[in-house]
Image (spheres, rainbow, N blue to C red):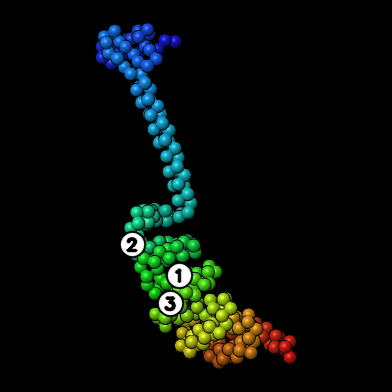
Amino acid sequence: MSESIQCPSCHQEIEGSRILDYSIICHCGHTVDRIGKIKKQTYRRAFLTGLLSLSGLLLALSLIHISKWGSHSVEVLPILSAQISGNLSEKLLVKLDAICKNKGNLECRISALEKLNNHFPKVQYKAQLGHFYFAYGSDKKAALLLEDVISKDPTHFQARYDLARVYGHLGEVELSQKQFRKLFAEKPNTLMVSVTQAYVSMLITNKLYHEAKITIHEARKHEGTEFILAKELQLIETELLAQN
């Protein structure tokens, strides 16, 4: 089937003999560059193909984003945009940490707190980051941060409690005992039961049964704690009998 083309100048149909491989020459003298036309068509097809590919990619990224952030997908967009542009504010990072907390995502919280600690250093961010490093098993990182916290704020009992446990994990028994004893001396009521349990656990792990037993008996002198750590005390008694 012969190609039928209308001249854009005289609007007459151009004879087939005037349609050449690289150009079209009308009887009126108007000439069309076929190479240019083919290039335009090629570019147009490439553009449409690229647009479709980009649309597919954006759709895939959107689905991944929704899968990752769930009900927070829209809320987190301005935070991610600010992160890409390098304009993250303290307020946005605190909001990101809150979203991560709501999702129960520890890695996400650590990432947000690392940024807060690096760009907006405050004792509260350092203490939280140290706490989560400890929870994540990064004991040495946690120790460095928590040591700095209690040097700046000696009354930060949660940080001192975390540091005592970190030292225990690292096998630094004397350092751990030192921090636990400071906590007992300060008597932060909201932490005392947890502190006692953690201290006794550390002592048992390191086979310091006599000190663990004394600690339990001291703790039981307070009202409402007369029967705490019963299993631990039984274990200690068994170990002490085995040593005799």
Secondary-structure class at tag 1:
helix
Mark 2: amino acid: Ser
Binning the other alpha carbons within 10 Å of mark 2 as few (below 14), some (14 to 19) or many (20 upward) gives: some
Does the CB distance between marks 3 and 2 fall below 8 Å? no
Gap in angstroms between the C-alphas marked 3 and 2: 24 Å
Looking at the image, which residue is at 42% across and 35% down?
Answer: 50
Q: Quadrant of residue 33?
A: top left
Vertical order, 134 against 32 (above or below): below
Q: Residue type at mark 3: give it.
A: Asp
Q: Secondary structure at mark 2?
A: loop
Q: Is residue 160 above or below residue 77?
A: below
Image coordinates for residue 135, horizontal then vertical, percent: 52, 70
Decide which of tag 2 and tag 1 comes sooner along the chain: 2
Lower position in the chain sequence, tag 3 or tag 2 = 2
Q: Residues within 10 Å of mark 3 (few under 14, many from 20)?
A: some
- Foreground mark, 3 or 2, reads 3
| Residue that appears at 26% across and 9% down | 28
Q: Nearer the viewer, residue 4 or 42?
A: 42
Q: Which mark is residue 89?
A: 2
User: Which percent across, then down, holds residue 46?
Assistant: 41, 31
Residue at the disc numbered 1: 129
Q: On the image, numbered disc 3 is attached to which residue? A: 148
| Residue occupying the point 45% across, 51% down | 65
- SS at circle 3: helix
Q: Quadrant of the rendered structure where residue 76 is? A: bottom left
The reply, left or right, for residue 48 in relation to residue 184 is left
* Left or right, 53 with reference to 221: left
Q: Does residue 64 sit above or below 209 in this rendering?
A: above
Per the model, the C-alpha gap separating discs 3 and 1 is 12 Å
Q: Quadrant of the C terminus?
A: bottom right
Tell me if I can see residue 208 in this picture. yes
